Amino acid sequence: MTSPVQFPYLYRWNRQGCKDQSCAVDVRAKVMNSCLVRFPDGYTMVTSRNALARLKDTGAA
């Protein structure tokens, strides 16, 4: 049994020096397709969900 990925998304946009960092979505909102994301270093930001890409699961089956 494998543990779940703690930061399952990749931040794609070049905003605030966070491009290509893994992140987790803490809160999603329908208004303006926005979300609150958290990065491994503890930094949080509100951004568009269009800025995120889901990381592929590389776990062996």
Image: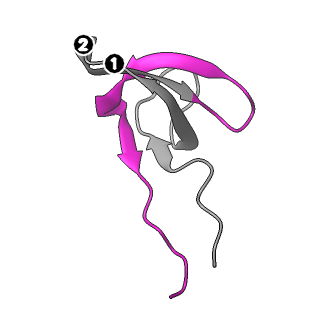
Q: Which residues are magenta?
A: 38-61
Residue at mark 1 to residue at mark 2: CA–CA distance? 8 Å
> In the rendered image of this protein, does residue 2 appear above or below residue 33?
below
Location of residue 12 by image quarter: top left
Where residue 29 is drawn, which disc sits there? 1
Q: What's under tag 2, amino acid-wise?
A: Met
Q: What residue is rendered at 26% in x and 20% in y?
A: 33
| Disc 1 versus disc 2: nearer the observer | 1
- The residue identified by callout 2 is 32
Q: What residue is rendered at 47% in x and 15% in y?
A: 46
For label 2, the SS is helix
Q: Position of residue 1 (x, y in %)?
A: 63, 79
In the drawing, does residue 60 fall left or right of residue 50? right
Where residue 15 is drawn, which disc sits there? none
> In the rendered image of this protein, does residue 18 appear above or below residue 54?
above
Q: What residue is rendered at 65% in x and 66% in y?
A: 3
> In the rendered image of this protein, does residue 35 appear above or below residue 60?
above
Circle 1 packing at 10 Å, graded few (<14), some (14-19), many (20+), is few
Q: Position of residue 42 (x, y in %)?
A: 73, 28
